[in-house]
Amino acid sequence: MRIYYDSWLMFKRSLLISARNPETIVMAIVTPFLLMVLFGTIFGNIADVGDYNYIDFIVPGIILQAVAQASQFTAINVTNDMTKGMVDRFRSMPLSMASVLIGHAAASIVRNIFTTVIIIATAFLVGFRPNANALEWLVVAGIFVLAIIAISWFAVLCGMIAKAPETSAGLMLPLFILPFISSGFAPTEALPSWLRWFAENQPMSPVIDSTRSLMMDMPLGNSLTLSIIWCVGITVIVFALSLYKIKRFA
């Protein structure tokens, strides 16, 4: 079908844009690394996470922060296309407008998977010692991919809504903050009751809890099911809104 070929072209275009701005990817890797070192060496000495190494505890939260930060680049690129005439040019071509968004999202997914692999490799250098077997790692990878897909499409939607690149990056800021207000850096039991309720019922926490449990051989509970529901639900909603927005724009 035409849309697959168009999406492939837009995907390659988005990767080429990334290649011309390597500093963005570098910052998306350096910042989480610094956070990992900071939390692991300073806050790790005062945080109470039971018998677990604090580095082991915070890795899922750091990964989600890295993905959220790297996805700002996607939102900015989409905004640039929407506000600087590129979408108008695409409209004059025999091109599926949905493929423009799919290309941005697909490139974002690839970039974020690469970033996640780098962050996990870096975590091993600073003391990360997971207990997961091959099957558990496969499930962990699947959960992170679902989360990356959801965040990438959320970035696409933010890029379409924003009127300027700076605004699109600002719309992505809550995703960088949410891991702090979750189970990512401290057990939710240590939070005030009103904040604890929010931390336990926002989408980041089940993703963090399920991946941490699988990697560290901790009780899984229903966090795996909740993480899948959150990721799939968010993806479906933001994907539909993005298509609706691009059709109205076109």
Image (cartoon, rainbow, N blue to C red):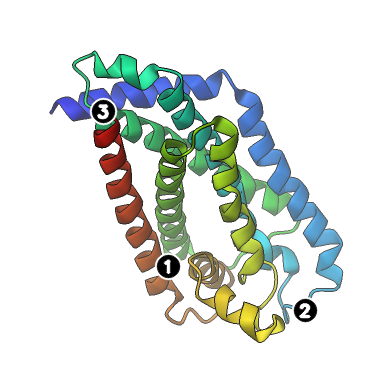
SS under mark 3:
loop
Residue 84 position in % (x across, y down) = 46, 19
Vertical arrangement, residue 222 with respect to residue 235, above or below: below
Which residue corresponds to the image point at 32% horizontal and 35% vertical from the top-left? 102
Q: Which of the two labelled residues, at mark 3 and mark 2, occupies the earlier sequence position?
A: 2
Q: Which residue is mark 3?
A: 250
Q: Which of the two labelled residues, at mark 1 and mark 2, occupies the earlier sequence position?
A: 2
Examine the image and state in which quarter residue 86 appears.
Answer: top left
Which residue corresponds to the image point at 69% horizontal and 53% vertical from the top-left? 124
* Label at residue 227: 1
Question: Which class describes the residues within 10 Å of circle 2: few (<14), some (14-19), or many (20+)?
Answer: some
Q: Which of the two labelled residues, at mark 3 and mark 1, occupies the earlier sequence position?
A: 1
| CA distance for labels 3 and 2 | 53 Å
Residue 123 position in % (x across, y down) = 68, 53
44 displayed left or right of 112: right
Residue 171 position in % (x across, y down) = 55, 46
